Amino acid sequence: MIPLRDSARPRSFPVVNVGLIGLSALIFVKELSLTQAGLSRLYAVYAVNPAKVAWAVGHLTTNPTAAPNALLTLVTATFLHGGWLHLGGNMLYLWVFGDNVEDRLGHVRYLLLYLAAGVAGFITHSLLVAPSTTPTLGASGAIAGVLGAYIILFPRARVTTLIALGIFFQLVDVPAFVFLIVWFGMQLLSGVASLAEPGMAETVAWWAHVGGFATGIVLGLLLRRRPRPPRPWDRP
């Protein structure tokens, strides 16, 4: 299922959402300019190392001074991507769903939700795949948080979705609640399957999606503001 647009329309320009997309794209262009050795060094410093993050989380109270470097990657890794498809898929979801969540929460709260969901997603993934040291990166956990908030804030919206039927494609308007529940179910099932196949968990951070989505639901409930009354020209 590929979302193309949603029926909800924001009332304000999504400056944070556009900024996040632009920043992710700029950093990816920088990644493309690096040699393989340079890219490996970049990932070693700024991508999430699940084993180190799991250790840091477990030692926050006993050895807090040793944790900051590993925990900082929970933010920096959100802005790294491993390829065009990785970047394009993530940014498409952010473009379709993020503007309305930002409009409802406000710019600052939306940014906090995005970063918090990304951090929670990486921590969830790290705790479940440790002692893996495979670098983990991408905005999927943060964007999953946006989806979690969207299902709380816009459950009755509709999502125009491109669905593959063999070699044919069809556009279908799907209720947002249905689309996101199906999406989350796929992530959860894949995450459970990955526990039996460790290599699968290292290829795609399914549990980052699950953790980010759950965080988005909670923060969507906590941070949401009352809808603004309709403007005169919005009334039928």
Image (cartoon, rainbow, N blue to C red):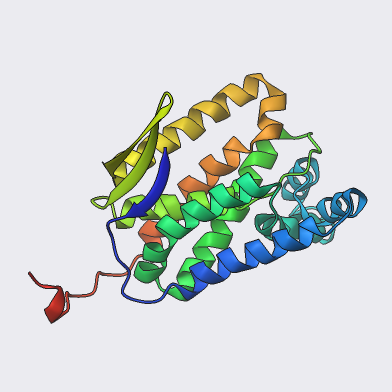
The answer to whether any part of residue 72 appears in the image is yes
Q: Quadrant of residue 204?
A: top right
Residue 27 position in % (x across, y down): 71, 63
Q: How many numbered marks are there?
A: 0
Residue 59 position in % (x across, y down): 77, 49
Q: Residue furthest right?
A: 37
Residue at x 39%, y 58% (from the top left corner): 220
**Camera-side residue: 155 or 36?**
36
Residue 236 against residue 57 in the figure, above or below: below
Residue 174 position in % (x across, y down): 28, 42
Q: Quadrant of the N terminus?
A: top left
Q: Locate residue 188 relative to residue 153 in the image: left or right.
A: right
Residue at x 16%, y 74% (from the top left corner): 230
Q: Quadrant of the C terminus?
A: bottom left
Q: Locate residue 123 relative to residue 9 in the image: left or right.
A: right
Residue 88 against residue 180 in the figure, above or below: below
Q: Quadrant of residue 2?
A: top left
The answer to whether any part of residue 217 appears in the image is no
Q: Locate residue 186 relative to residue 80 in the image: left or right.
A: left
Q: Locate residue 217 relative to residue 54 in the image: left or right.
A: left
Q: Residue furthest front?
A: 167
